[in-house]
Amino acid sequence: MYQFNVYRIGPEIKLGSVDISFTNASLFMVISSLAILIIFNLGAKKKTLIPDKLQLLSELSYSFVAKMINDTAGSKAKPYFSFIFSLFMFVLFCNMFGMIPYAFTVTSHIIVTFVLAAFIFVGVTIIGFMKHGLGYLKLFVPSGVPMVLLPLIVVIEIISYLSRPISLSVRLFANMMAGHTMMKVFGGFVISLGIVGGWLPLSFSVALTGLEILVAFLQAYVFAILTCIYLNDALNLHH
Amino acid sequence: MLKKIVFLLFVTCFACFNTVFAAESGGMPQLNPEFWISQIFWLIITFGILFIILTKVILPKISDNLETRKSQILENIETADKQKEESQKKIDEYEKIILDSKLKAKSYFNEAREKILDDINKKRAGLEKDLDEEIGEVEKELSDLKNKSGEKINKIAAETSAELIKELIGEEVNSSSIAAIVEDQSRINKERKDV
């Protein structure tokens, strides 16, 4: 599990008694953010009628995310577009940078995904209460449920609502970690089986790399679209 | 044999797992809280900066760009429609001109044709009149000739017969009686002919 190790790069930085040193995880966060900023800045720089490659890429991503938000959360979610766009791009780039050999996968750490998910959870809850006041609690009382079942349903709804940040964060973290671990296991097989028996696990490793790239995109998409769905719950209260 | 191979495979797999995970100890690094605070701190910083720059600088540019493109395309479509309409109008005009000129040409043609026909008719009428006149004249001449020729023939016949008689009998015969006979004969001939 060496690939998941976090280690300090450079000097130890202390803020009071807490350690906020720059680590390899921080390095890859910075790299991902910089890559996003550079690509999209280059893509947004030229304003031609017929876009070049980078411009097309940035515009396609823009309309992709815009369509995703519009489809799941409706037009009311427009003010949150830039947040969801940044979130999607950040997770996507972190996942993709993790696919480079010897790179560190930021999203394979539960603490990172949990902070993102918790932020989304808190934000969505605040938005919900701001929009609907205490009426937001109606989210836990689905309409058309018999009175007898209501106490049980409300408890289940509350638990499912509270488990949202956990499920959101664990989904991303577990997917990334499992994929990288699997690739490592097959890579280890290649080494230990040697030149004679190593071809089969090697081909598996190659196939897994493709699969992992797909998963990297898919998990970023799922993360963003679940955020949209939670936002939809908060904005359009009709359970 | 097969059992042996399967068994060997299992053993190698087990050995592989052992060698692969021999170095691993202490569980998952993800659950080691040593760098949690650092990760949260750097996550907030990097994601915050990313979010702010994207929101303030880059995304407005992209959306602006998309909007201008959309409006420009709409504008272009509009002008294209307008130009199409105009060209349609021009085509209509052109066709109208062609139709008009065709009609004009037809009317000119008809006029000319009527004029010529008129001319021809007039000329033909004149010619026919002339012809009729000439035919009438000729006919008159012919009938005159016919009438005169009867008398002349009778006269000649009377003279010849008088001379013949003189030659034959050596005596002069009363010419009037001969003329009467000739006339009688010619009338009989004529009647015979008519019958």
Image (cartoon, coloured by chain):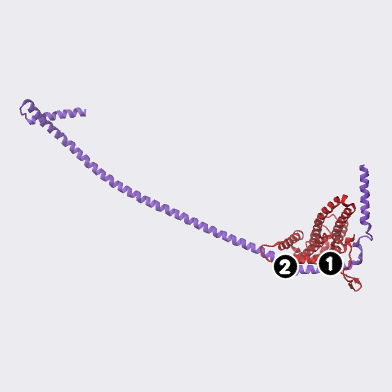
Pick the residue in front: B85 or B169.
B169
What's the colour of chain B in the image? purple
Mark 1, secondary structure of its residue: helix
Cα gap from disc 1 to disc 2, whole angstroms: 28 Å
Q: Which residue in the structure is indicated by mark 2?
A: B60
Of all chains, the one bearing label 2 is: B
Image quadrant assignment for residue A96: bottom right
**Residue B3 left/right relative to A97:** right
What's the colour of chain A in the image? red
Q: Which residue in the structure is indicated by mark 1?
A: A27
Q: Is residue B181 above or below residue A94?
A: above
Q: Select label 1 or label 2 by which is in front.
A: 1
**Residue A71 left/right relative to B97:** right
Mark 2, secondary structure of its residue: helix
Of all chains, the one bearing label 1 is: A
| Residue B80 visible to the viewer | yes
Q: Is residue B167 above or below residue B15?
A: above
Q: Residue at x 51, y 57 (%)?
A: B92
